Amino acid sequence: MPTLRGELTVTRAGANWKALISGVSAAASSPDNRIQFVFPSGLGQFRGRVNPDGKTIAGFWCQPATAANQALASPVVLMRSASNVWRGFVRPLDGRFTLYLRIFRNADGSLTGAFRNPEMNSRGGASQFSVTQSGGVVHFAAQPDPSQPPIRLGADLLSAPDRLQIYWPDAASVLQLQRLSKAEAAAFYPRPPGSAPISYREPQNIGDGWVTARARDVGMDEALLAKLVQQLAASDPSVRRPALIHSLLVARHGKLVLEEYFFGFDRDEPHDLRSAGKTFAAVMLGTAMLQGIRVSAQTHIYPLLSAMGPFAHQDARKNEITIGQLMTHTSGLACDDNSDRSPGSEDAMQGQTAQPDWWKYTLDLPMAHEPGAIYAYCSGGMNLVGAALTTATNTWLPEYFDRTVAQPLHFGRYYWNLMPTGEGYLGGGAFVRPRDLLKIGQLYLNGGVWNGKRIVSSAWVASSTSQHVAITPATTGLSADEFPNFYGVGADGFAWHLDWLHAGGHSYREYGATGNGGQLLIVVPELDMTVVFTAGNFGQGGIWSQFRSRLVPERIIPAIRH
């Protein structure tokens, strides 16, 4: 957990600045209105700018990386409290790790255990374990893959009553598990045990730009929606393949009509978007083009970023790669997140330490294919769109996102991923509120306008959500047998995934953003509807993919009456 939090006080004496937070101070010297404080021992940074009226300092708190998260930037506003004194509140994202264990008895008298972790879906390698005890040790065993050796875990019974101690690799530490009542373990369940039966309720208007309404007012059956929510709330998270849905939101005809949260999450808690955050690349590129900045999907990335050169693996084909090809995963660079052998995969890029500049790391990759020829999912390539935006706008990426997207769309608290260099990362992973992710879908449904303010052009909405590449065995270069292990047949626009939903004998065009674990933004233009799921089924695509393919067409679309 970051150690610095709470009130941040900044004082100024001429060109000399001082900051104090949690008893730790930092100094900076700046003759103008831009300041940056670097706190000792890597505890964090603050970077901001005094507004022209001198009343506020708008900036970002940059918290250091942890075992759970990359470094993150979150907006902070300091208010002037006295002459040359400003104060504001820093609230870093907590890098918590929660582990639950439920042990239950089967009909034959044997015991089964299920480990559950909402932050990472860390399960110990299996969804369920057989449980036995010998002396002071509790043994857990499972063999989810018959071709692999069994998984065996051991936990010590402690002298204190009702406690287990177990080493947990994903937390890199020994954890103590204490027996809890159902009330104390409420967040283990979708809704606390004993909760009242679900009835439909209209979302609350909290002044964040959303117009709220009852579902019946936009032609949706409230009883059917309540039935779906009840089903999600009553689900058992300890079964073998649970759907760990954290939130479900629906907007229709521009109004938020359903907003439900599970597993202890709520409307104010930013959620990890994983790769659904990649879609911000398309939104921000659209804002830049609307401002007349000379950057577009047709811009060639290497000439734009030539100042970062010289580049390794010189190849004339690199000069032909466009931003559009980066956003459709067709750059031709040796970058494939689905291949352990790919030098440009996100795991390889983020796991190495020789090159902290991930933009440069990706630009230095060799070419594997002709640009535009092969589809290979590449987070590093999407991250290069962030390099293009930073260069073209001459603005730090989190600051540009805040000014052009977050503020106009009235975002609540959010956190933006940073690279080791401190530059913004656009390969996915921002933490935002589900309500705010849903706004991106509504913005595009509105042709690029949010609450009367144009954010991107209608032409860009149409272009970025049109098909620019098909995803098939032929376009990926995979065999028909290999292809289903990595992709489903579909298509991509510019940082948007395109598909069809089949409901009631009708097919509806859909475009959306998708992130590991079940972070889904789904836009259905024909129905004037947007849907958001956030979830914790990380690494379980066979489960979370059904939120889009089954829950939406089988449970949400049928609730539309007119």
Image (spheres, rainbow, N blue to C red):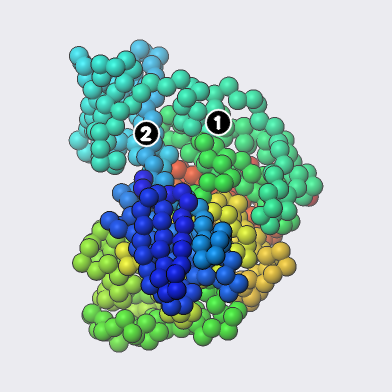
Task: Name the residue tied to disc 2.
Answer: 99
| Lateral position of residue 456 relative to residue 296, left or right | right
> Which residue is pictured at 49% across the width and 64% down the height?
59
Task: Name the residue tied to disc 1.
Answer: 191
| Lateral position of residue 398 relative to residue 447, left or right | left
- Give residue 328's quadrant in the image: bottom left
Spatial separation of the CA atoms under disc 2 and disc 1: 17 Å
| Lateral position of residue 328 relative to residue 217, left or right | left
The quarter of the picture where the N terminus appears is: top left
Whether residue 157 is situated above or below residue 505 in the rendered picture: above
Query: Would residue 483 be seen by someone viewing this image from the given angle?
Result: no
Closer to the camera, 5 or 494? 5
Q: Residue furthest top?
A: 109
Q: Is the residue marked by circle 2 packed among few (<14), some (14-19), or many (20+) residues within 10 Å? A: many
Closer to the camera, 20 or 189? 20
Mark 2 or mark 1: name the one nearer the start of the chain. Answer: 2
At which x and y percent is residue 47? 43, 66
Report the amino acid beneath label 2: Leu
At which x and y percent is residue 81? 56, 59
Closer to the camera, 78 or 532? 78
Secondary structure state at the residue bearing disc 2: loop
> Which residue is pictured at 30% across the width and 87% down the height?
316
At which x and y percent is residue 77? 54, 60
> Which residue is pictured at 68% across the width and 57% down the height?
209
Report the amino acid beneath label 1: Arg
**Figure label count:** 2
